[in-house]
Image (cartoon, rainbow, N blue to C red):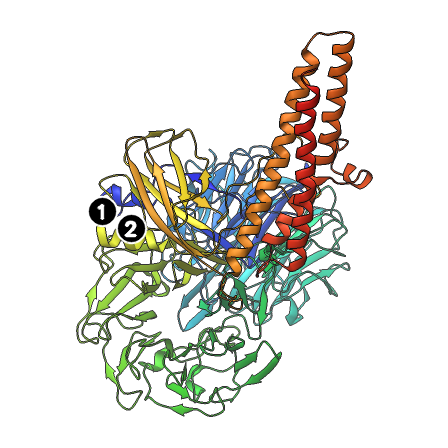
Amino acid sequence: MAITLAIATLLAPLAPPLAAAPSIEDSFAMLDWRNVGPRRGGRSIAATGHPARPNEYYLGAVGGGLWKTEDGGASWRQVTDGQIASSSVGAVAVAPGNPDIVYIGMGEGQLRANVMQGDGVYRSADGGKTWQHAGLAASRTITALRVHPRDPDIVYAAALGDPYAPGEERGVFKSRDGGRSWTRILFRSSRAGAIDLALDPANPDILYATLWQVYRKPWQLWSGGPESGIFKSTDGGASWTEITRNPGLPRGVLGKITIAPSPADPNRVWANIEAEDGGLYRSDDAGRTWTHVNGDRKLWQRSFYFLRVRPHPHDRDTVHVLSFQLERSTDAGKTFAAVRTRHSDVHDLWLDPANPARMIVADDGGASVSVNGGRSWTEQDFPTAQIYRLAVTRGFPYELCGAQQDNSTVCVPSRPAQRFGRVSHVDSFADFTTISGSESGHVAPHPAKPDVFFVGETNGLIRFDRARDQVRDVQPWPYSVMGQPASSMKERWNWSFPIVFAPQTPHALYAGSQHLWRSLDEGQSWQRISPDLTRADPATLGETGGPIRPDQDGPEVYGTIFTIAPSPVAAGMIWTGSDDGLVHLTRNDGRSWANVTPAGLAPFTKISFIHASRHDPATAYLAANRYQMGDRQPMLWRTADHGRTWQRIDSGLPPEDFAHAIIEDSQRPGLLFAGTEHGVHMSFDAGQHWHRLSRGLPDTHVSGLAVVGNELAIATHGRSFFVLEGLETLRHLAANGPPATSTLFPPAAAVLDVVPARLHLHLTRPVTAPRLTISDAAGTIVRRLALPAQLSAGAHVIGWDLRHDGATVFDNMILEAPNPAQGPLVRPGTYAVTLDLGGETLTASVPVSPDPRLEPLPAGAFAARETLSLALRNAVSLANQTVLDIRAEKARLLAQPGQGAAARARDALVQELAAVEATLYQVRNQSPKDKIAYPIQLNDRLAHLMAQVDEGHGAPTEAQQQVYDTLSDELDRALARYRAALRGRKPA
């Protein structure tokens, strides 16, 4: 694996401290997160483009911020990281009159069960490079943004509000100054917000808006009521007329409504309506009267999640309805046919008003661009996956696994796949393993069988054997349910029900409905080992989705076990937490149970995660949240006495950064990591003080965490998986506090060809001309690392690729072989690091081990490889240095005046030196492909053999040793010829 030397100096301003001296944050500021994929798009409900820029589009990722393409969707880049304070983009609008002005609205209006709420509106005036907050933070959910076609400072926002609680900042708002101030121009009540908003393309003073009376609880969605309605303004929103009951529109209870006037004919207005007589309605007189043109349920199924309508800009009879599929009608809504897209569940569509065949669609797979009217689409290969939970395998490198929203479960390697010591693909994390299972289930890798996984799904618990590609359903109670309330179910399975193995053999498998189930034979048989461990309040087990149409496919099944935590140090000790606020503990594998719910914990609080300490069987940590009850405060607890008493440990966390998960470090007791709605926090002291650990991590919902060796792995609900290296530094800080002097932290172990050495450094002062050397056990220097001429005070990370110093090279050298400036790999062992700071020396030791996946080598194999590789490196250096010496000698000779015999002797010597040079290096090479025309020479053959010997796992082959001997002889002859030329001809 060609790992290059990496040196990063962190000079960016640090995040403000939460509850401790700033120096502690300074101490670990060198740590940085890396995304490991999958590069598989997640849900998007907002996308747009601009007619003036045919290759430029934006997509708003749910939980992933705003992304931009400037090459027509071939590649995408994130443009809001570090600049916005929430993650879900629910609306995006580019100013028609200035494509550099972009507005985004935060929060999700397509109200699935665990929507993420936002913090208002942001504005960019430079095409997404920089962003400023533009108000409406308390709205929680912005569903639409509309910009005046001629004045980009006039912008309208539809605010749905908080779906979990009443609020006043909802309705339609208008800004005349680019979002610096807002006026609410349409409002009905604290229970109904704006869900859609449209400007008449022919007259921007004419607006249509729809209000939606809706609420969510963890156990229920209720869509519709007397405050849903349709409104029209003809004076830029100064006044509104309700047209909800105009002739032709449905009577009775109304739910969600979307609306859009046709750009081809402003008198034609389309509305898609959730009602008893729901479906697509059309007006041909600007909303005065209406016709119900199509009631096909495919157009208004799951209205809370779909329903948007997008007319064709040129053809008044062509209209699109966004639903499970992208539906298109070309006969004024009478009939519809699906337009095939990359992914199902379509949420937004933008059609270029100048060229309607150019479009972008947003769906549950991300966004795709089409330039041919939807016949083909670009890929959705960006890392915006929404992962529900995290599981890690025990292999090396380990895998991060989880279920992706509206996709399959997936596993990705924590490091790039290796093939013969090299990264296998240009984008090595593009590859991932799909594990059988649905979008929301937990994943439980078998502790002793690396290819066996258990995965939950709606109406299923799957045993998947990856090596044999075998799938079996082994659920404890295979009684399928759908379309019915939780009260009618014998076993209530949460949409994301927990599955977990006991760490101890025989590795019992546990799964939770309202009861805890145990299997000792990988699901062939199950025993129910608990009573109902939930509140089972009848008020929370009823019908959901009404009052117009029930919607009961699983996410609202309530009164269930939500988390299971077997103790890693006490066999038979198991903690459970329910989604309705109960914590239970058994210490005898289910024979008896104790309710150990923290005192004062409010009913219907979701016990999101319990972590059982591996350091003390009496200690456990608990993360809970009530954001779906309208309470967004963080909630973390700790017990040290088997749950008899609990201590709140969330003091100092940001007030609305509610928690999803918490874990303790595997080596350092009391070193905690919490995954929250906006990132990761860390505590050195068992939760008394917290510090933000999100440097380099975007604002995103962190749904799961795991400590694996010296790394912290996380799952996010919007940005796929991340890994943070450097827990050894955090453990040192936990034990010793922030450094009072310049410190080289104890490095983590490195692995040949896989894990480079990572040196963390904290300087209390700037240092000029630092020098870093690495020596082997005998004290021989193997590497002199080049450092910047000056290192600033603060945190730094220095990388060593586990290689010796490379060979001598020269400028413009063209070889068939790999660049010999990259030195050979060292052998396994412990290496001394010495950092000379000028008057101060810091030292550390780096253990280097072989790849544990490979078979052990005979004694001396690594040493033999290193010995021959170094001999080849030295030979390459000698050959290349001789080329340099010859060129310098030729230059000196040719610079000397002379004539007659002296000139002839000089020219003869130059010619002889050139001949020697040509045997050492192919001097005719001037471009990379010249090596095809002209034979490679000695330095190239030596460098090529050096790379071959250094590659792979094992001692050098006999053939490699023999060819080295042959090349060494050739080099000796060339050098002897060089020396003879100088001795014999130079005096003349």
Tell me the quadrant of the picture where the C terminus can be found: top right
Quarter-of-image position of residue 727:
bottom left
In the rendering, at what x and y percent does residue 4 appear?
53, 44
Nearer the observer, 964 or 583: 964
In the rendering, at what x and y percent does residue 904 appear?
78, 14
Can residue 498 be seen in the rendering of this structure? yes
Q: Where does label 1 land, which residue?
A: 20
Q: Residues within 10 Å of mark 2 (few under 14, many from 20)?
A: many
Separation of marks 1 and 2 at Cα, in angstroms? 8 Å
Q: Is residue 236 above or below residue 865?
A: above
Residue drawn at 76 percent across, 17 percent down: 907
Nearer the observer, 598 or 665: 665
**Marks 1 and 2, the one that precedes in the sequence:** 1
Query: Circle 2 — which element?
Result: strand
Nearer the observer, 479 or 8: 8
User: What amino acid is found at the position of numbered circle 2 in the picture?
Assistant: His
Q: Where does label 2 land, which residue?
A: 691
Quarter-of-image position of residue 911:
top right
In the rendering, at what x and y percent does residue 110 appear?
52, 60
Nearer the observer, 487 or 368: 368
Residue drawn at 25 percent across, 54 percent down: 734
Find out whether the residues at labels 1 and 2 contact each other: C-beta distance under 8 Å.
yes
Q: Is residue 773 above or below residue 450?
A: above
In the rendering, at what x and y percent does residue 152 appear?
55, 34
Residue drawn at 50 percent across, 78 percent down: 449
Query: Circle 1 — which element?
Result: loop
User: What amino acid is found at the position of numbered circle 1 in the picture?
Assistant: Ala
